Image (spheres, rainbow, N blue to C red):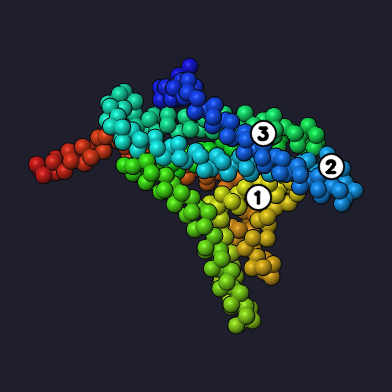
Amino acid sequence: MYLNPIVKKDIMVQSRSMKICWGIFVYELVLALVFFLAMSIIQGNSRYSTGNIYSAMVWLYPVLAITQLIILGLVVPVKTASSISGEKERQTFDIMMTTGMSPISVILGKVMTAIVQGMFFVVASMPVMALPFIIGGMSWAYLFWFLGIALLVSLFSASIGILCSSLCKKSISAVILSYVFYLIFFLGTVVPPVVVAVVAENLRYTLGSIPQPFEVYGDNIYLCLLLNPAVYLAEFFARVMAGESLTNNMGSFAGQTKAQGPIALMTTGYWWFISATILFVGISFLFLYFASKRINPIRGGRRRASHAVKNRH
């Protein structure tokens, strides 16, 4: 079975280091603190209600899951952001590129290493994550859903970090640029819908109604929220915990008009969730492709050769 040499080397080196042990310790410590805090809140609320405390333990699932996803989203891009730029700082990048590995193999190796490390932490937290399923009575299918979401978050975060690492010469610059990308996805995708909602409200206030073209096509600007990780996770946990969709009323201008066009299709059933998943996977592989092109050592040589041939003719 073929195993990427970079993945094999990095995993072997890190498995012999105490850093991975301390990393798991800190990870589990954070989960333990969140767990005890959530349990204290559940016990406090159960004193004033007639519900069973065991049934309330299902809420440990979103609390622990969101905590782990936040940790993955913050840590994974830091690991990949220092992968290529770190090789440049140690002056080993040129040596690595002289091996028989292609640029895309190097990129995939670095990304797979970060994903394996992240999923290793997630798997180590399974005893704590199993409590809502054993005691709270949740379906075990939701546990596998969480593993899939964690894998997607790791892939998306790692692709952002590796792209920034290929663009920057310093690791600290790559890390900062990675979080700038985060701001673009988390905040930049929210600005257009907010602007549309404000404009629609002003038109309704001044004109008494929304013009027909704006009403028909203005809703579709909400599709940019498909690229918002926060909306994606909120939609997932809303469907799991409440069986409802947060995006059903999206684009309806505060519920006074009915969404039309693509937004009407995306907010029915699981189409929003499926479409967002496909988009995040596609963007991740697009970032990996750009990163591989960026570190290609013969990229500039091909350009110079083509210009030389043109000059000869």
Decide: few, some or many residues near mark 3? Use Cα within 10 Å; few <14, some 14-19, many ≥20: few
Residue 53 - label: 2
Residue 267 relative to residue 218: left or right: right
Tell me: 76 left or right of 267. left
Which of the marked residues, 1 or 3, is nearer the chain's N terminus? 3
Residue 171: percent from left, percent from top? 37, 41
The alpha-carbon separation of the residues under discs 1 and 2 comes to 26 Å
Kind of residue sitting beneath label 3: Phe
Q: How far across and how far down the image is residue 280, in percent?
A: 52, 45
Image location (x, y in percent) of residue 196: 55, 68
Q: Is residue 178 visible?
A: yes
- Residue 84 versus residue 103: which sits nearer the camera? 84
Q: Verify CB contact (< 8 Å) between mark 1 and mark 3.
A: no
Give the alpha-carbon distance from disc 1 to disc 3, as whole Å.
Answer: 17 Å
- Mark 1 or 2: the one toward you: 2
Disc assigned to residue 144? 3
Say which residue label 1 marks: 235
Camera-side residue of 51 and 37: 37
Which of the 4 image quadrants contains residue 297? top left
Circle 1 SS class: helix
Residue projecting furthest to the left: 312
Residue 158 image point, x, y percent: 47, 39
Identify which residue, 179 or 307, lies in the foreground. Answer: 179
